[in-house]
Image (spheres, helix red, strand yellow):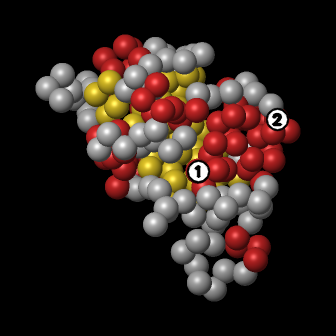
Amino acid sequence: MGSFYTNVTLRGPAQEEVLAHLGDRACYVSRTSDGFTVVLDEASEAQDLDDLLEVTASLSARFDCPALAALNHDDGVLYMTLFEHGEQVDQYNSYPGFDDDDADEAGNEPVGGDTASWVAAFGGDAGALDAALRDSEFVLATQRHAAVVAALGMPDFAVGTGYNYVEADDVGPEGEAAGFVHTSAGD
C-alpha cells in the first residue's frame, strides 16, 4: 500500500498569519521556510478534491499569494493544482487513466502542469520542473512530488506529509523539522 496525503504549499504568508486565518479549521501549519509555508488540512485528507481546492482557494485569496495543492493517491497518482489570487490557474495529473481500466497508453501520460506558470509563481528551475512533471521514470508519486518540490525550491517537508501522518506522529526527520502547529489550541 502506498502513501495517501494532501497538502498546500503557500509562498508568502508566515505560519502565524496562516494559523490565525484558519481559525478553528482542523489543520497543521508548518514553520515558514524561505518564504514557504505548508498547510495540512484534515478534511482534505479523505482525498476529497473539493475540500482541498476550497481550502487552497481560500488561502490564496486571503493572502493574495500563489498556492500549490498536492494530492497523492496511493503513491500511484500525483494531482496538483496551482492557485493565484484565489483563482485556479493550472492543474496537473500524473496518471489521468488511473481509474479507467480501458485507458490506452495516451491515458497514462501526465497532463497539465504549465511549467512557466509554476516557475513564475514560485521561482525555481523550469528544466528540472518540466522533467519532474513529465519523466516516466518515477515509480512512486512521492518521488515525483519530491522532484517537483526540489525544482521549485520548496522545503522538503512538503513531500510525504499530510494531516493523518502528523496526527499519528508518523513523519520522518523532514516532517519533524517542519515545526507543525495545530490550528486548535485545545489539541
Quadrant of residue 163 within the rendered picture: top left
Name the one closer to the observer, 114 or 156.
Answer: 156
Instruction: Report the front residue among 114 and 165.
Output: 165
| Image point (77%, 40%), residue name | 129
At 76% across and 73% down in the image, what residue appears? 106
For residue 97, side relative to residue 7 (left or right): right
Q: Amino acid at mark 1?
A: Thr
Depth order, front residue of 3/20: 3
166 vs 37: above or below: below
The residue that disc 1 covers is: 142
In percent of width and height, residue 182 lies at 28, 28
Say what amino acid the circle numbered 2 marks: Ala
Residue 107: name its quadrant: bottom right
Q: Is residue 19 visible?
A: yes
At label 1, counting other C-alpha atoms closer than 10 Å, the crowd grade (few under 14, some 14-19, many 20 or more) is: many
Q: Secondary structure at mark 1?
A: helix
| Between discs 1 and 2, the one toward the N terminus | 2
Instruction: Tell me whether circle 1 and circle 2 mark residues in contact (CB < 8 Å).
Output: no
Element under disc 2 = helix
Rendered location of residue 10, percent (x, y): 53, 27
Name above or below for residue 62 compared with residue 70: above
Task: Examine the rendered structure and indicate whether residue 143 appears above or below residue 148.
Answer: below
Q: Which residue is mark 2?
A: 126
Q: Name the spot of residue 185 as percent of width and height, x first.
A: 18, 22
At 46% from the left and 38% from the top, the residue drawn is 172
Residue at (57, 64) in percent of width and height:
76
**The C terminus lies in quadrant:** top left
Q: Is residue 62 visible?
A: no
Q: Is residue 6 left or right of residue 65?
A: left
